[in-house]
Amino acid sequence: MGSRSAEKDDSATETRRGSLSVTESNTDCNGDVLPPPPPPPPPPPADGSQFEEGDKVLANHKGCFYEAKVLEVAYKDNEWNYYVHYIGWNKSWDEWRGHDCVLKHTEENLEKQGVKQGIKSAMAWRVSKMKPRCPNVARGRKRKQDSVDTVVSPMEENLVPSDNLLTFNIPRALRKQLTDDCEFVTQMRKLVELPCSPNVDDILKKYTESKMTKHGMVSNSVEEILKGLRCYFDNALPVMLLYNNERKQYEATVSGDVSPSSVYGAEHLLRLFVKLPELLIRVNLAEETLKELQDEFVDILRFLRNNQSSLFVSTYKAVEEMEKQEN
């Protein structure tokens, strides 16, 4: 009896200990019952993801769709998610986008969503953040000299290469063109007569035709760069490409649906090339995009130099004479 009783007591003790251990495993240090572990995530749908790694898509970023490439695919929060790289932009912009933020890359979606393509949108971004002003207001002799420096000096400096810096030199003949242009406007009070012929639209068209003659075709990326350059010119001209005494002429000529690129010519287009390095340094472009832009800009400058006599005006008119003609 004694031994059986002892065995029974030992058994009971083991049972109680076992029960206690089970209870302890489901309570915290205060004795409160812990919630059950979360259920495993549901398996991805059998039909699979709509896009795969490497697919070219349209991805939504802050309300606008951009061309992008799918780098990774993951099923999370009951939907497919895509890690995308925006084409033409630095990889620091790569991000995860949900299923609803990614569309197929089709001509219909490109047109429907008004897609902002990499190079074009990157070029226009910097100017769109600026407020209109005249950067070359002449106040006295020293200020006039500053105006000349503003136009000419950036390209005469030895620019240090970096990941986000365009490095190209304006040919000597075009640098002299810039200096003469500045002296005519700021010191002699003479302006380019508007509208110019050829205008910026005509010049870019002539450049495209010259590439067609030379290579037999114009790539999509070159067409995109030229569209972006035109867009950039239209936005930049009233912001930073006019001298103070040119503003009245601008306000009288450009209004409504008239674009600066249909009115102004090579003189003001050349001023834009001076400003491009300092403007695009703050745009987070991919290295390959920056190199492509640089090569194309150098080629356009070469075209301007080779056709300088036919693209640039030979005479400037005095402001008083132009106002008298208008009256």
Image (cartoon, rainbow, N blue to C red):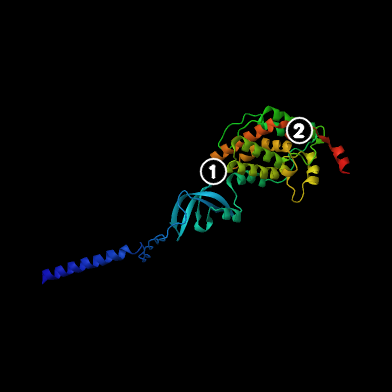
Quarter of the image where one finds residue 320: top right
Where is residue 219 drawn, in percent x and y? 58, 41
Image quarter in which the C terminus is found: top right
Is residue 293 toward the left or the right of residue 269 in the image? left
Image quarter in which the N terminus is found: bottom left
Is residue 24 toward the left or the right of residue 290 in the image? left
Where is residue 249 drawn, in percent x and y? 80, 42
In the image shown, does 157 or 8 lie closer to the viewer? 157
Which residue occupies 81% across, 46% down?
252
Q: Earlier in the sequence, mark 1 or mark 2?
A: 1
User: Residue furthest toward the top?
Assistant: 172
Q: Is residue 146 visible?
A: no
Which residue occupies 72% across, 28% down?
176
Which residue occupies 21% across, 65% down?
14
Give the amino acid at mark 2.
Answer: Cys
Mark 2 is surrounded, within 10 Å at the Cα level, by few (under 14), some (14 to 19) or many (20 or more) other residues, namely: many
**In the picture shown, does residue 294 fall above or below 77?**
above
Quickly name the residue at label 1: 90
Where is residue 266 drawn, in percent x and y? 72, 37
Element under disc 1: loop
Marks counted in the figure total 2
Quickly name the residue at label 2: 182
Element under disc 2: helix
